[in-house]
Amino acid sequence: MSLSEAQSSVAGTKRPVTMEKLVNLCKRRGFVFPSSDIYGGLGSTFDYGPLGIELKRNVKEAWWRDMVQRRSDVLGLDAAILMHPRTWEASGHLQSFTDPLVDCKKCKQRFRADHITGDRCPECGGELTEARRFNLMFKTFMGPVEDEASTVYLRPETAQGIFVNFDNIVDTQRVKLPFGVAQIGKSFRNEITPGNFIFRTREFEQMEMEFFVRPNAEEEERWFNFWVEFRYNWFLKYGVARDHLRMRPHGAEELSHYSRGTTDLEFLYPFGWGELEGIAKRGSYDLDQHAKYSGRDLTYFDDETKERFRPWVIEPALGVDRAMLAFMLEAYDEDVVENEERIVMRFDARLAPIKVAVFPLLRKGGQPEKAQAVREELQRYFPVAYDQAGSIGRRYRRQDEIGTPFGVTIDHQTMDDDTVTLRDRDSTQQERIPIARLASEISARIGWHR
């Protein structure tokens, strides 16, 4: 799909899932729990359960595979969360990373001033205070003394770790423009009004890439358009519907202080369209600022033109948690199978937390032992579930609800000829497969090579 076609795709279709349904499923089946749940939780912080961490790991690995491992022009990095405080002076975060905050004089609740209409409290109708700027960075102290000299910050983005390592990467990797540096890591923002489950939280993970190009407007625009389309198509590749995804260029009044132009990829959440990923033209702002504040040159020498300059940057930046939320919402479905209602999470098989479940049809006749042997063999290649409790239909439903794409049933015939039934989650169709080629068949159906 072209850039203009995607920008015009804005209608969207109604979803079968509410946020409440998804939140309930996530807690009930072990995807996402409220953090510190036994103590009543901690505002907008979440823990990823046994299924959630597998889904999260798969999302990150899919991004890393497509953004780094399958490209010859992108390298990886893992920078520290704690950085020299001058980093945040140079980047502008100490001065500009703020939101307007208002308080209700009556109920004492706090709100972002730009998220409310009128001059009264949206909760109780009370009078609001004048807006004041609130810095979103978490502050802490390094060392035994808590004073201004020992102040450090939890990073609000991973990007600056890439920029401060620019010289290290150029000096050690013999890179040539254009090239990118990518990383996945935790970031922290002291949001005034977090909410909508894992859409906006104070602790989250980011997947960011800084793509360095020559300081040329034509070169910048070409690569900006490339990455916008590449990232748009990445979500389609892993199962997001076209009418639930759109491109929205930023207006001049909403551009970040560093941005020469930004396009958001927006997803149709139950609460409406919201940002999923941002692709920004950062120019040479970051390298210029860090050169100024550090005294380091931070330029690139072009062997072909014999010129020295600071490259411009294109930045695709995606939150892992928002990507997970989008994939879970997209996967959620309700249908009827054999006159029985079911919830089914139709994850792309590459993202599914569990790839295959193994079931003995009966709990006797050597079937459980055979099933355990099949499970052990398949676990060499995939995350595998085992279930022998209840009717086979109920067991299928339990796996459908967590998105397991394939089910393997050991039955009477298995004991005679070493074949099993391989069930597809979405179609519910079953096929007889020899155990000897079960792993290769499942692997092919997952589509690791795509």
Image: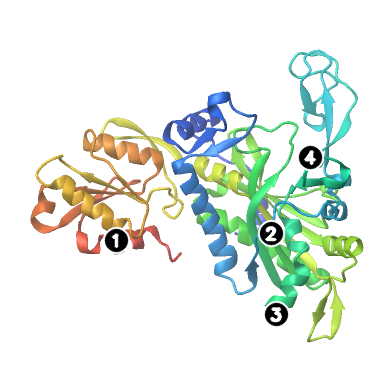
Q: Which numbered disc flags the more N-terminal residue, 2 or 1?
A: 2
| C-alpha gap between disc 4 and disc 2 | 21 Å
Left or right? Give the position of 430 relative to 116: left
Q: Depth-wise, is mark 1 or mark 3 nearer the camera?
A: 3
Q: Which numbered disc flags the more N-terminal residue, 4 or 3?
A: 4
- Amino acid marked by disc 3: Arg
Determine which residue is flagged by label 4.
Answer: 136
At label 2, counting other C-alpha atoms closer than 10 Å, the crowd grade (few under 14, some 14-19, many 20 or more) is: some
Determine which residue is flagged by label 3.
Answer: 174
| C-alpha gap between disc 2 and disc 1 | 37 Å
Question: What residue is at 19 percent from the left and 53 percent from the top?
Answer: 420
- Secondary structure under tag 2 reads loop
- Secondary structure under tag 1 reads helix
- Amino acid marked by disc 4: Leu
At label 1, counting other C-alpha atoms closer than 10 Å, the crowd grade (few under 14, some 14-19, many 20 or more) is: some
Q: Depth-wise, is mark 4 or mark 2 nearer the camera?
A: 2
Determine which residue is flagged by label 2.
Answer: 79
Residue 289 in the image: above or below residue 179? above
- Amino acid marked by disc 1: Ala
At label 3, counting other C-alpha atoms closer than 10 Å, the crowd grade (few under 14, some 14-19, many 20 or more) is: few
| C-alpha gap between disc 4 and disc 3 | 37 Å
Residue 440 in the image: above or below residue 29? below
Q: Position of residue 46 (x, y in %)?
A: 58, 36
Question: What residue is at 73 percent from the left and 41 percent from the top?
Answer: 189
**Colouring chosen for the image of the structure:** rainbow
Q: Which numbered disc flags the more N-terminal residue, 4 or 2?
A: 2
| C-alpha gap between disc 1 and disc 3 | 41 Å
Q: Which numbered disc flags the more N-terminal residue, 2 or 3?
A: 2
